[in-house]
Structures are given as structure tokens and as C-alpha cells.
Image (cartoon, coloured by chain):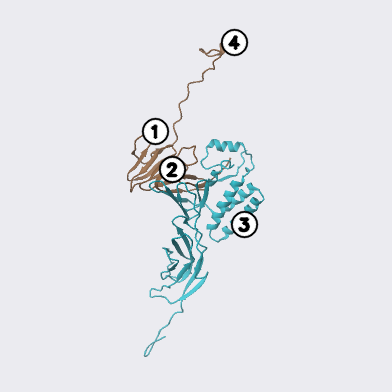
């Protein structure tokens, strides 16, 4: 009877030659050899393998939105870390793997690799899907969605910049503003703390659920890339918004997005003008 | 005598009998195919010295190279379904299967896509780094 053999391997784990996992590009004879040395029980994981899996899951958790799936993954990751501390590496790998799977439901993976003309530097940008690993000079870095890194030939991998800290407005701040003639609300200025090494900041403002109202068009996301540490938004429709800011460094790549902040735009009470005998009365 | 009599003709007792004529090597298995060509795309086979014009659905083998001129583009589709899109002015090589890499980017920009990263994997190597994506679950 063929027993289902649980074997998971990150591509990043392939840097560990003795890792007991099936490698993505390993030959079929390698897989057969592995299968021959294992029975129905999962293979024993080595510390390096488990540590890599933990790193990958931590990176995925960091980039995940705050929802039930993330919280469940967090529990699995804590279990994995407990197992790791107590040297139960197979259990640690298994739990880290579960956490990763929760955070990475099936979706395509996309990344870009750009090599300059003389081959001296490589820029890797992760765009979508599960994280990728970048290896250089025997060091490995994990890129989550939106992150990038530039690697100079013969140099070590630079650390990504830290995520910027949003400053204003405070979380869930409610702006009450008079609508401009087209019925939009503003101005609202977002600001954040400087990040060492960053030369620009990418800001994204996303509308949250819009109350169903006839004739109300849902707002579109607005984005900007700025050298400054603040941005005055264009006037926006009333509603709730969520924003994040990402630091970009020419040498270190992109940070993960900041923790999201929310704000609400509400129209000031309607001004009623009533026509009276001698004109209009407010 | 009986033992000698069982030897194939032409063999002495000290010689091992020759096996049947060696079977021809199996044809090489393509590692990928070229698709969605646009503009001037060229290929250099591992055993060739010259570049020649590429065409759609051309199989790619170990150590073949593909280059795109400025403004051209192409897709390298691997057997497992992962895809590498080559932008203009790029040069890539198909890696040997014994290496844990699939494609080597020597110049230019590639966009790599794995439709099913849970079961696919892709490794891209450059002169300075190796990028690995995807994950593989094996069942016995």
C-alpha cells in the first residue's frame, strides 16, 4: 500500500544539501532514493530545514492582512517555534508548513529578475503570490509580496529597509469636511516617519466597504510615489479608507508595507437653503 | 567442456561475453519550449556556434541560449508549466537538468510566473544571485 508521504520543500531549502525534503528540481532518482530511505512516517527534519521553513512562514505572516486566516496561521507558527525550541524539528517544519499553507492559498506566483548590461548587479522584485528566496554569497533572503532587492556581484545581500511608521492621521480618525463642488471631500494629509536609507515612499490608499447607496460609485484606490514624508490626498468620496506606506531604498530594495491605518471621510451636515420672501435663508 | 561449449562463439573462457549491441541513446528531452515570440528572437543551440532565428514552439534543451533584441520578447515555458517572459535585449540560458536551476539570466529582464506554485518550482540564476520560487509536495 502506498502511504501518503508528507514531504514539503521550499525551494529555499535547497541550499541545505542534506535536507531530507524533495527538492524542486531534484532528479527523479533522487526522489526515489529519498523514498527508499523513508517509510510511512515523515522524514526527520534538520534544524536548518525547520529554521528556513519558520523564516518563510514568518515572512508570509508579516505580509498577511489581519484576518481570521492570519490569526490561525499565527497559532500554528507559535506551535512551530515551540517545537523548534525543544528540538522537535520535524514537528516544527510541519507546523510552519501549515502556517504557510494557510497564508498562501493557491494563487499564481510572479517575480521579476533584472540583470544589468554588464551582469554586475541583479534586481529581484517579488510581485505576487508566495514568497521567493534570493541566495547570494551563501546567504538567503526571503522576499514577500512587493519587496525587492538589488544584489551586486560578489557582495552580500543587503537587508530590506524597515517599514515606515505612519504618523498622521491616527488610526480610525474621522474627518468631517465640507464637500467640494463635485461632492468630494478633502484635503487630508497623510504623514509617516523617515526610514534610514529610503529615498522614496510608495503610498496606497484603498477604499473599504462602501455603504450601498443608489448612484454612489465606489472610490478607486489612489497611489503615489513621493520623496517627501507626507502626502496631501486628492479630494475623495465620503467613506472609509485604509492606507499603507512602503519605503524604497536604491540599495536595499523595498520594505514590507507599513501596518495599515484607517480613516473615514464624512460630509459635514448638509446646509439647507430655504427660499424666503427676500431671498435665501440658511 | 560443457561450460566452454556454452560460451558464445569467438569468446575464450577469460573473456566476458559481449552483450547485445549498445542501444542508441534516447533522444534528449526538451526542458522547455519557446512561445509568444515577438520581434527579433534568436537561439543558439548548445552544440552550435551560430545564432539562428527562433520560432514558436521551438523545443529548448540543456545549455541552449535565447536572446532577444531591443523591443523583442518571448516566453520560455518549462515542462512543469512555469513560464519565463523575456523582455527586450535579454540573454538567457537553459540550465543543465543536473543543476538545481532552470534558467540563467545573463542580461536583461525576465518576468517569471508559476500558475500553481504549490506544485511547481522555478529557479532563476544570474551572475550575482539565485532566485527560487514555488514549492513542491511529493506523494508516494
Of mark 4 and mark 2, the one earlier in the sequence is 4
Foreground disc of the pair 2, 3? 2
Whether labels 4 and 3 belong to a single chain: the reply is: no
**Which chain letter goes with mark 3?**
A
Local packing at callout 3 (Cα closer than 10 Å; few below 14, some 14-19, many 20+) is few
> Dots 4 and 1: beta carbons under 8 Å?
no
Residue A43 lies, in percent from the top left, at 62, 42
In the picture of the structure, the residue carrying the numbered disc 1 is B47
Residue at mark 4 to residue at mark 2: CA–CA distance: 61 Å
Local packing at callout 2 (Cα closer than 10 Å; few below 14, some 14-19, many 20+) is some
Does the rendering let one see residue A101?
A: no
Colour cyan maps to chain = A
Foreground disc of the pair 4, 3? 3
**Which chain letter goes with mark 1?**
B
In the picture of the structure, the residue carrying the numbered disc 4 is B2
Give the color of chain B as drawn.
Answer: brown
Of mark 4 and mark 1, the one earlier in the sequence is 4
Q: Which quarter of the rendered picture does the C terminus of chain B lie within?
A: top right
In the picture of the structure, the residue carrying the numbered disc 2 is B104
In the picture of the structure, the residue carrying the numbered disc 3 is A75
Q: Is residue A208 above or below residue A75?
A: below
Whether labels 2 and 3 belong to a single chain: the reply is: no
Count of marks, rendered view: 4
> Dots 3 and 1: beta carbons under 8 Å?
no
Given residues A29 and A159, the one toward you in this image is A159
Foreground disc of the pair 4, 2? 2
Label 3, secondary structure: give it.
helix
* Mark number, residue A168: none
Q: Is residue B2 above or below residue A195?
A: above
Of mark 2 and mark 1, the one earlier in the sequence is 1
Whether labels 3 and 1 belong to a single chain: the reply is: no
Amino acid at each position: 500500500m502506498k502511504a501518503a508521504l508528507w514531504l514539503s520543500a521550499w525551494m529555499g531549502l535547497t541550499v541545505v544539501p542534506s535536507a531530507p525534503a524533495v527538492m524542486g528540481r531534484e532528479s527523479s532518482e533522487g526522489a526515489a532514493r529519498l523514498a527508499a530511505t523513508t517509510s510511512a512516517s515523515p522524514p526527520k527534519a534538520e534544524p536548518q530545514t525547520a529554521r528556513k521553513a519558520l523564516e518563510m512562514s514568518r515572512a508570509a505572516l508579516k505580509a498577511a492582512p489581519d484576518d481570521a486566516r492570519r490569526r490561525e496561521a499565527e497559532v500554528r507558527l507559535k506551535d512551530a517555534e515551540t517545537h523548534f525550541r525543544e528540538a522537535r524539528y520535524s514537528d516544527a517544519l510541519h507546523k510552519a508548513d501549515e502556517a504557510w499553507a494557510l497564508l498562501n492559498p493557491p494563487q499564481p506566483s510572479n517575480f521579476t529578475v533584472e540583470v544589468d548590461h554588464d551582469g554586475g548587479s541583479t534586481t529581484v522584485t517579488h510581485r505576487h503570490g508566495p514568497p521567493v528566496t534570493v541566495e547570494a554569497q551563501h546567504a538567503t533572503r526571503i522576499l514577500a509580496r512587493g519587496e525587492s532587492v538589488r544584489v551586486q556581484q560578489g557582495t552580500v545581500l543587503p537587508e530590506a529597509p524597515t517599514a515606515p511608521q505612519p504618523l498622521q492621521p491616527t488610526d480610525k480618525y474621522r474627518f468631517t469636511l465640507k464637500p467640494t463642488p463635485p461632492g468630494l471631500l478633502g484635503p487630508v494629509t497623510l504623514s509617516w516617519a523617515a526610514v534610514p536609507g529610503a529615498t522614496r515612499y510608495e503610498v496606497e490608499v484603498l477604499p473599504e466597504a462602501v455603504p450601498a447607496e443608489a448612484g454612489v460609485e465606489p472610490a478607486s484606490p489612489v497611489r503615489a510615489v513621493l520623496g517627501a514624508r507626507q502626502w496631501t490626498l486628492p479630494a475623495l468620496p465620503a467613506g472609509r479608507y485604509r492606507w499603507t506606506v512602503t519605503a524604497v531604498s536604491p540599495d536595499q530594495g523595498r520594505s514590507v508595507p507599513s501596518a495599515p491605518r484607517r480613516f473615514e471621510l464624512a460630509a459635514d451636515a448638509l446646509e439647507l437653503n430655504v427660499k424666503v420672501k427676500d431671498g435665501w435663508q440658511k | 567442456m560443457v561450460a566452454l561449449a556454452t560460451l558464445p562463439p569467438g569468446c575464450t573462457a577469460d573473456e566476458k561475453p559481449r552483450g547485445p549491441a549498445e542501444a542508441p541513446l534516447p533522444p534528449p528531452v526538451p526542458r522547455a519550449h519557446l512561445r509568444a515570440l515577438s520581434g527579433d528572437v534568436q537561439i543558439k543551440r548548445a552544440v552550435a556556434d551560430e545564432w539562428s532565428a527562433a520560432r514558436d514552439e521551438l523545443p529548448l534543451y540543456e545549455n541552449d541560449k535565447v536572446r532577444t533584441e531591443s523591443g523583442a520578447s518571448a516566453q520560455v515555458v518549462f515542462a512543469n508549466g512555469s513560464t519565463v517572459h523575456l523582455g527586450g535585449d535579454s540573454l538567457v540560458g537553459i540550465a543543465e537538468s543536473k543543476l538545481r536551476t532552470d534558467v540563467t539570466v545573463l542580461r536583461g529582464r525576465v518576468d517569471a510566473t508559476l500558475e500553481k506554485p504549490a506544485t511547481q518550482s522555478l529557479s532563476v540564476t544570474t551572475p550575482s544571485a539565485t532566485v527560487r520560487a514555488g514549492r513542491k509536495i511529493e506523494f508516494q
